[in-house]
Amino acid sequence: MKFNIALLAGDGIGPEVIDQAVKVSDAVAKKFGHEITWQPALTGAAAIDAVGEPYPDETHEVCKNADAVLFGAIGHPKFDNDPSAKVRPEQGLLKMRKALGLFANVRPTFTFPSLLDKSPLKQERIEGTDLVFLRELTGGIYFGEKGRRDGGETAFDNCVYTRAEVQRLAKKGFELAMTRSKKLCCVDKANVLETSRLWRETVQAMEKDYPEVEVSYEFVDAVAMRLVQWPNSYDVLITENLFGDILTDEASVISGSMGLMPSASMGADIALFEPIHGSYPQATGLNIANPMATVLSAAMMFETAFNLPEEGKAIRDAVNSALAKGIVTEDLADSGKSYGTTEVGDWLAANI
Ligand SMILES: NC(=O)C1=CN([C@@H]2O[C@H](COP(=O)(O)OP(=O)(O)OC[C@H]3O[C@@H](n4cnc5c(N)ncnc54)[C@H](O)[C@@H]3O)[C@@H](O)[C@H]2O)C=CC1
Ligand SMILES: CC(C)CC(=O)C(=O)O
Ligand SMILES: [Mg+2]
């Protein structure tokens, strides 16, 4: 098969981890007889520097016309440390998600058998953890009206959700739960927030369409606690944009490193695959970033966007075997030997 993939490397470690995912994807294509054409395009601070905006129209055209998008990360300290900056890399990420209609961000959290001792959590608590967050990605407080008043002394960010937005995300959650253990947790703050009450009411009304799914409703603060206390008590969790962003970073410590967790952002017409981490600016150019989250995002791309599970499995097998053999970057090496980002990528590509 032939694939045309938009490649948005972005900033910081983005280009370094994307290079490894490209290497590994090319190795998969070679092994299984596919042809990939990569279409690089600008985004983030790199795009601001080059053309003055973080998600240029040309990049949108490339994405729209691709079979899938592979995304690294965006963000640069020169913007993070300047709250008054009018144009920011993150605006590009949000614009891209909205413009491509990527409303459902699938963020799995799982453990690797060879890494159980790398998590700061007790082994018996995390063993067998295999859960999936469905994070709503194009609504909520990130997209509501924001601004200042009172001469800049008061700031506001509005959180808005429509019933239709909740329904389409929850539908995906129910459907996913039906393919797994038929357990769904709706994470909200319905004791305080009106948007959360709309979430809860909407999901409750959908329960009758999925009688086999056991639905629980939990407040986000309690989930933040139970997620690290008994992570394997969860299976599919649905939640709004901000809560999902925060909880999935927290959940990444279960696996052992933020550099391991992939994601798929699904829309009606196109899907984008990206690690859950950011541009990790401290590591830029040092060849130390873990590329596995991005490599595993490429595995999700083969499985989800191209419906090629064997190709995805070939990538997952290579990652598992690298982890078992200790071919890992410094975030997972403890006092043992660590490998560079490029060495890990080379090893994975050679072992597909
Ligand atoms: N999707 C995206 O492009 C995202 C972009 N950002 C942006 O990234 C920049 C940095 O944000 P931070 O809050 O520091 O989040 P971050 O995710 O970049 O890094 C947080 C910490 O996670 C660890 N980490 C992240 N990626 C890793 C990797 N591949 N290998 C090993 N360890 C890794 C490091 O310990 C790092 O200090 C900011 O400009 C932020 O806005 C943040 C999150 C998501
Ligand atoms: C930079 C944010 C807008 C996004 C984020 O943290 C994420 O998608 O995980
Ligand atoms: Mg985040």
Image (cartoon, rainbow, N blue to C red):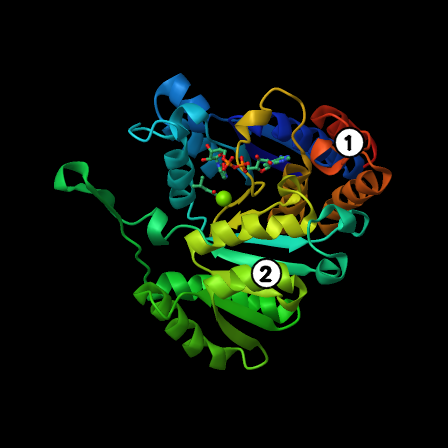
Kind of residue sitting beneath label 1: Ala
Q: Quadrant of the C terminus?
A: top right
Q: Residue furthest top?
A: 50
Q: Which residue is mark 1?
A: 349
- Dot 1, how many residues are within 10 Å of its Cα: few (below 14), some (14-19), or many (20+)? many
Query: How far from the left and from the top, in percent, is residue 27?
Result: 76, 32
Q: Residue at x 41, y 23 (%)?
A: 78
Counting from the top left corner in percent of width and height, residue 122 is at 73, 57
Residue drawn 41% across the image and 66% down it: 167
Q: Specify the amino acid type for callout 2.
A: Leu
Q: Secondary structure at mark 1?
A: helix
Crowding at label 2, few (<14), some or many (≥20) Cα neighbours within 10 Å?
some
Say which residue appears at 69% left-offset and 46% top-offset: 256
| Residue 99 visible | yes
Left of 270 or right of it: where is 262?
right
Q: Is residue 307 visible?
A: no
Of 194 and 66, nearer the camera is 194
Is 29 or 146 nearer to us in this picture?
146
- Identify the residue at the far right of this view: 325
Q: Position of residue 223 (x, y in %)?
A: 53, 63
The residue at 37%/19% (across/down) is 51
Which residue is labeled 2 in the image?
227
Q: Which mark is residue 117?
A: none
| 317 horizontally vs 278: left or right | right
Q: CA distance from mark 1 to mark 2?
A: 34 Å
